[in-house]
Amino acid sequence: MRLNVLDSLRGVFALMIVLLHTDMQSHLFYMDFVRNSDIFVDFFFVLSGFVISLSYMGKTGKRYALPEFMLRRTGRLWPLHMVVLVGFVLLVLIKALVAALGIFAADVPYTKVEITRFTIENIFLVQAFRNETVLWLNFPAWSISAEFWAYALFGVLCLAPLRWIPWLASLSGLIAFAALQGWVDFGFGAFVNYGLFRGICYFMLGHLCYLLWLKLRHLRLRAATGVEIGVVVLIVLQTIHAENEIVRMLMPLTFVLAILIFTFEGGVVSRLLSLKTFRILGDRSYSIYMIHALILNVVGLMVRMLERILGQDLYSANQMQEGTPMLIDFGAPWMMDIATLLLAIVVIWLSGFTYRYVEMPGQAWTNSRIVAWRLRREVG
């Protein structure tokens, strides 16, 4: 079952995170809806729990399914993650060269030993287990690490009898929620505001969303357009006010509601999200999310070099929060709005290449390995 509208919604939210990280002195940068867009990572977790449950629940109880399950999940996440990681390593080397040539200083606040350790952690997707928040190299990949281990935990839970899985998932989600709220301390996973437990908690919530959907999927959604518009307005309002702890805590439940509503694909919002433009965003959502930090770092390096060439400052202070990194500024705010949108378009365009030449081949190779593995099992 392909959930086109939900894929499109994931693409829109991935694009919002690009806007969040595009540090330009624009009107867009200071909008509350953009500044709080990090909340959409929770949607990714909930949707993953829903989609994975929808795809794999039929294989529960079969112990041999666990390695196949993890191989598929690794094939989905790891190839693009590694390509971007290599891109960041090359960028670091370029920055070192630029600094050695005296073009501008590119200091890294970590030792070589720390950098090596951080890179190894990223390769094996274990950075979410650390306590110290180190946004080294591809910083959005913290959520990929958390999601990967949520996959692993869910795969293990699916070894249990089918009737136990909802209870085990609920228990796992509650324990993760307790860690997320600071009620219990496991001594690990505090990375990015307990991102590991955030991923596990909301992934398991997505599984419960799937179980609820099984009960509701045969119903007819009345006044679909009004309901869809209502949930969109609710998401917008909650995102604008996401600095409130209660609002932020309730947001994943709103995402559950959105998933349940948009699986019906019955209203005008669904028809809008079914347009080709949004379907492209949905297909490329993972690439958009993964490559944007690398592209923004390249742009930052180019701006710094341009500063040196022109002898003119092209950065200015963040007007919202002192002590934060400087923002790119080479004109009026409306010009920077245009630059921000153009940069987002570049990210979408480049994501087409990584989707076609990294994501799809990686998944195809994984699927071929699984087929070969199955054949060996049958022959053996």
Image (spheres, rainbow, N blue to C red):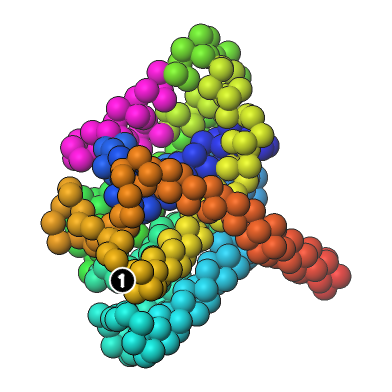
Element on which disc 1 rests: loop
Q: Quadrant of residue 368?
A: bottom right
Q: Position of residue 79 (x, y in %)?
A: 60, 68
Residue extending furthest top?
Answer: 223
Determine the residue located farthest toward the front in the rendered image.
310
The secondary structure that dominates the magenta segment is: helix
* Residue at (37% x, 90% y) in the render: 100
Residue drawn at point x = 66 percent, y = 37 percent: 2
Q: Is residue 370 visible in the rendered structure shown here?
A: no
The residue that appears at 83% across and 66% down in the rendered structure is 375
Residue 134, horizontal then vertical, whole percent: 29, 71
Residue 272 in sight from this viewpoint: yes
In which quadrant is the C terminus drawn? bottom right
Q: Position of residue 10 (x, y in %)?
A: 51, 41
Q: Is 247 contained in the magenta span?
A: yes
Q: Amino acid at mark 1?
A: Gly
Q: Describe residue 101's horizontal placement relative to residue 124 as left or right.
A: left
- What residue range appears in magenta? 230-255
Which quadrant: the N terminus?
A: top right
Q: Determine if the magenta segment contains residue 379.
A: no
